[in-house]
Image: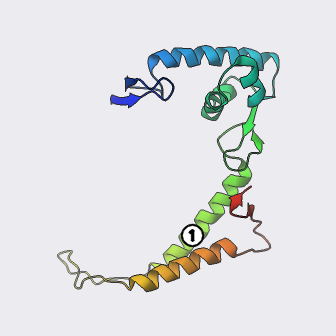
Amino acid sequence: MFEVKTCPDCKKMFLRYSGRVCPQCHSIRQQQLNSAIGLVKARPGMHLKEISRLCDVAERTLQDFAEEGTFRRLNLSVRYPCRLCGTHINNGSICSGCHEELARHIIDLRSKMVDESRVLRPVRVSGQYDETFSPAASMDSVKKAEALNAILSRRDKNRRSLRSGGIIR
């Protein structure tokens, strides 16, 4: 339940029972959040960079609040960059385009892994295997590398990839 952590803001050790920072830094962050909320209420739809500059609060702290849904719970509109591509979003940590791209890659990888891992070993009633399992390591790694390259390079008409030069945009 309780664990000893180091506060990311002040680097002091504290007993963590809730939150990411120590109680002193939590009260400081709460004051910063209140000033940011007051500014956002006065000017809805602002970017986090502007709020950070005007309130003198770290942009990373404001982005943490936004990703946790603090502004959205108060029905405030704040725009901040997606962690992968940098487009401006209103909720979550990644945009819907990056989310769909990652989901496609996960589905493709899962289907390839299921096709390759159909190796069944005979099992005795006691639960022990009849023979030791020793796959050809060099062949399996080559097959996995080829499957991964095939997934990453495949382009269908229905599947639009947002990957450009190794960077998801």
Q: Position of residue 86 (x, y in %)?
A: 74, 45
Placement of the N terminus among the 4 image quadrants: top left
**Which residue is located at x 60 percent, y 66 percent?**
107
Q: Is residue 165 left or right of residue 134?
A: right
Residue occupying image coordinates x 59% and y 63%? 106
Helix, strand or loop at disc 1? helix
* Quadrant of res 54: top right
Q: Seen in the image, is 151 located left or right of residue 116?
A: right
Q: Is residue 31 left or right of residue 122?
A: right
Q: Where is residue 90 in the image (x, y as percent from the top left)?
A: 73, 36
Number of residues whose C-alpha sits closer than 10 Å to that of mark 1, classed few (under 14), some (14–19) or many (20 or more): some
Q: Which residue is drawn at 74% across and 65% down?
A: 161
Residue denoted by label 1: 109
Q: In which quarter of the image is residue 166?
A: bottom right
Taking depth in this image into account, of 100 and 43 the one nearest to the observer is: 43
Q: Nearer the viewer, residue 5 or 122?
A: 5
